[in-house]
Amino acid sequence: MKQQSQSLFRCFKSGQSRSQALVPGVSAEAIATIVEYAYKRTLFGHINLGNVQTLLETADYLCVEGVMDECSQFLRARMTPTNCVSTFHTANAYNCTALQEEAYKYIVTNFNEVSKNDDFCELEIDEVVKVLSDNDLEVDLEEGVWYSALRWINEQPSSRKCHTGRLLRCVRTAFVQPSIIKKKFLCHAYIAQCKEARTQCNATLQYLRESGPVLPIPYFAERRSPAEAAFIVGGLTPHGPTNKVSVFVPSDILFKAPLLPAPIAFHQSVAIGENMYLLGGLDENGSSSACWKLDMRKMVWERMNSMCQRRSCLASCAVEDKIYAIGGYSGTSTLSTVEMFSIPTNQWTFLPPMTIGRSGASATLVGANIYVSGGFNSNQCLNSVETFHTSTAQWTRVRRMKFRRGSHISYAWRGRLVVMGGFNGVKTLRHSEIYDQEDDEWKDFHPTSVAKAHHAAVVTKNEQLYVFGGLNGLDASSAIESFSPDGWTTACEMDESRYAATACLVSGRKVLSRLLD
């Protein structure tokens, strides 16, 4: 007991035999729990949401670090967007440094959800500024930082609107569309009445009008560290196949990554951990069996063991440390074969084939199953769909799509499969449909902005869909479009039109920061 706390020890230091001790300001229940901890060295089963703060307060008062650690672990395991701010304040009040740091990191990396909760408005001005200024702040769009600051001000406008200039300074306004600055920022009463805020908005508009680089870079044009980015790999351009790798960060930044070893199109790419893998495709020698890895730490391409078969127009999917290459075109025939690449062993092995050969199909992981939809066989466009059960290595047919389609995209949306666009053998489609596994039924979904095939897409962790390039009849696109329930918007343009490229999402600040350096 003395080792656990000198304060607690002094309560029992009297030479008389006593069954009770008085500890001012501490409940008997909390003392009993801490005494039990002194003997058992664990609070398992004794901490709950109703007593954790009392236990933490008592342990801090009595300097019982073991109890403080267990309370911190309990709160850490239950952190959510609705309670992370209160956890941050609790940790600060009781000097739980590690918990405080983790709660702060949680606020920053889950800011889109945290800022919508009432607890966000309980932050003090210095805390809000620290969060909004953080280079690691994860936001879908930079203007969202101002809207969050505005929400915080409106909670107590009489006492908080005086901080408008300081809060707007946290916003990297150079990454906000000029029309939004003019119509939404400068026209807002708080900014209109704040000289510092107006000055920043006008300086940003001037900066965005400059045709050349401005040095030094002003504070409002400094990039935040990206948490995730889409790699757009290869494809066909107006000049033929390309070996370009473009990297798009959802804050509308587009920059370059190391070139591919050779121009390629009709291939596939997947991201696993700190690496990206490129499979097959069509190069100068025809359909390829090559497998390449982009090592994000070194930023170099490395050749891996080749697939067992040549494949262009294939589908692919990553599951844990395995990559699946599905169907495609060998150069002479449409393939039904499937092979799996084990990253730890650098080896390809055949798996049971699909029920039909498919090229130009699309594959998506939904839950634990890989859904392969549409595509083309030797003589027709397909609307059939089959699913590969990774646990049993068996294929099962599911209900057919409403429309035949190939060269389309598919993705997982809130636990369901969505297919979008593509070519039906006659024309390019705008139509999208979503599959409900429980009802075994396809339903219409939001159509694309224009009819597209041979496009690429990624879905961010915030469920934002980005679509890159594509082909509408004979017209190739350079647009990067984003989709949300509110509709389609153009995020930015690539430097040239591109189709038959692939895109995959890469996560990790340390990895991506190397591309920005």
Image (tube, helix red, strand yellow):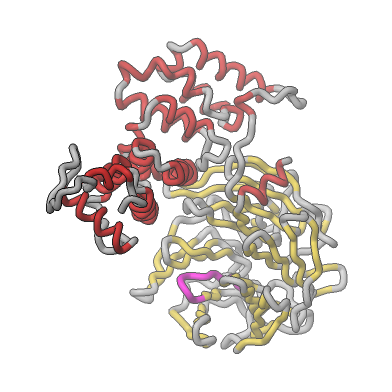
Position in image of residue 236 (x %, y %)? 76, 58
Compared to residue 208, the image places residue 34 above or below, namely below
Position in image of residue 416 (x %, y %)? 43, 66
Q: Which residues are magenta?
A: 361-369
Q: Nearest the camera: 415 or 397? A: 415
* Residue sitting farthest toward the left: 19
Position in image of residue 204 (x %, y %)? 61, 22
Compared to residue 481, the image places residue 367 above or below, namely below
* Residue sitting farthest toward the right: 285
**Residue placed at 50% from the left, 61% from the top?**
431
**Residue placed at 61% from the left, 21% from the top?**
205
Q: Is residue 269 visible?
A: yes
Q: Nearest the camera: 224 or 3? A: 3
Image quarter (top left, top right, bottom left or bottom right) of the C terminus: top right
Quarter of the image for residue 327 reads bottom right
Left or right: residue 451 versus residue 190 is right
Q: How many marks?
A: 0
Quarter of the image for residue 82 reads top left
**Residue placed at 68% from the left, 67% from the top?**
268
Position in image of residue 405 (x %, y %)? 57, 70
Q: Main secondary structure of the magenta part?
A: strand
Check residue 263 for magenta coloring: no
Left or right: residue 65 versus residue 420 is left
**Residue placed at 74% from the left, 60% from the top?**
295
Q: Nearest the camera: 132 or 418? A: 132
Q: Is residue 237 visible?
A: no
* Residue sitting farthest toward the front: 15
